Image (cartoon, helix red, strand yellow):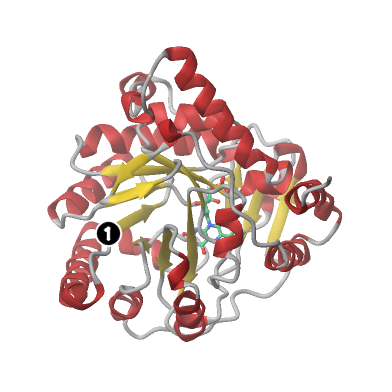
Amino acid sequence: MIRAVDLFSFSLPLLRWLDPEDAHRLAIQGLKLLPVMRPKPDDPKLAVRAFGLNFPNPLGMAAGFDKNAEVPDSLLRLGFGFVEIGTVTPLPQDGNPRPRLFRLERDEGVINRMGFNNEGEKAVLRRLAARAHLGGIIGVNVGANKDSPDRVADYVRLIEAFAPLASYFTVNVSSPNTPGLRNMQQAHILDDLLAKVIDARERVRAKAGDSPVLLKIAPDLSLAELDEVVHVARSRRVDGMIVANTTVGRPTSLREPERAKEQGGLSGRPLFRLSTRMVAETYVRVEGAFLLIGVGGIDTGGAALTKIRAGASLVQLYSALVYKGVSLIDDIKNDLSATLLRTGRESLSEIVGADAATITAEDWPV
Ligand SMILES: Cc1cc2nc3c(=O)[nH]c(=O)nc-3n(C[C@H](O)[C@H](O)[C@H](O)COP(=O)(O)O)c2cc1C
């Protein structure tokens, strides 16, 4: 018998015949129709304890796919260990004019300049509240409205509003598509932002419970900037970092340089080396003060493993789904399980950061 999930998995790569944004919309609609079924139980050895949460497996859906929390439970049923919704802003926002999403087919990359298009706090809150009884780890990625007079206040407001429903928060200061947003990674601005965000979290803790706060950074920071970001993150006691968002850089190796001229953030396979390097660089600076989520160009079990060995306790992906379909989720998990079995290890935590020192000694990826 053909399972619905197999049919979906088969048809996802076919969506590549369509305009990328239409294809994304269709994928979301398809996921809404995914029948309720129990996901296959995960290999217990893939379980990860991080940020005070028990992740059934280390593979998460990265932010930006389900910006409005329309299909988090379908994504969990497909086998993701956690789902990050958003970026959500306080007010609904249209984002940039279309076209704003581009495939670099031959590079297996994606460029986007969506610009935080989302339905806003109220609509997303309503959806999360309606599925709260279902459990599962749902992170809420928060950002500021483009025209906000006080961007810090936007983050604070979202933390207060979503705290009862978010398994964790991601403070996104690294999207390249909201002008000026990435400046919030500058030490003095970041320090003020994180102080107020953590304050907000503490204010609502008694009523809303604990909500870990993670900081998501750009892969384009210089190492001197990364020093400062990690210093601020540690001194403000964030619970973790997500490394990394899309890059505004364009690797020289791209096979579709014409397409690559589109403005926006590049993701997918061409981001893998840079983002992995940034995971390792972050890992050696954090010195175990908190754990990392690694994201950028993961498209195989081997790539996930490399990210983990660079210093990531958990991983996320988005772009590779466009090229490989949802069967990739099981493929990656099976590969990770097989590696643990083959090497006689009890859990992935034993290899987190094992290659960080080696990777940071390599030539800088170009
Ligand atoms: C179309 C698209 C939209 C995205 N939107 C967001 C977003 O709203 N917030 C965010 O933090 N990251 C966003 N991202 C970045 C991803 O979460 C991820 O960090 C990045 O794509 C690298 O992972 P990948 O190579 O597996 O795609 C987006 C990525 C893509 C491709």
Vertical comparison of 74 with 116: above or below? above
Crowd band around label 1 with a 10 angstrom C-alpha radius: few (<14), some (14–19), many (20+): many
The image quadrant where one finds ligand 1 is: bottom right
Going 42% across and 51% down the picture, which residue do you hit?
A: 218
Q: As displayed, is residue 193 above or below residue 300?
A: below
Residue 244 in picture, x, y percent from top left: 43, 47
Q: Is residue 217 visible?
A: yes
As drawn, which residue projects farthest toward the top?
343
- Residue drawn 51% across and 59% down? 63
Residue 308 lies left or right of residue 214; in this view the side is right
Residue 300 vs 221, above or below: the answer is above
What's the residue type where badge 1 is placed?
Pro
Q: Is label 1 in a helix, a strand or a loop?
A: loop
Q: Quadrant of residue 257?
A: top right
Quick check: 236 left or right of 274?
A: left
Query: Whole-percent x and y of residue 188?
Result: 19, 62
Assess mark 1: CB under 8 A from ligand 1?
no
> Residue 195, how many percent across, how many down?
17, 67
Quarter holding the N terminus is top right
- Residue 346 pos. (x, y %): 36, 23
Q: Give the quarter of the image for residue 190.
A: bottom left
Q: How many marks?
A: 1
Using residue 178 as the reference point, say whether residue 234 is left or right of it.
Answer: left
Q: Is residue 65 visible?
A: no
In this view, the residue farthest toward the left is 235
Q: Nearer the viewer, residue 177 or 139?
A: 139
Residue positioned 17% across, 49% down in the render: 234
Question: What residue would you read off at disc 1?
Answer: 212
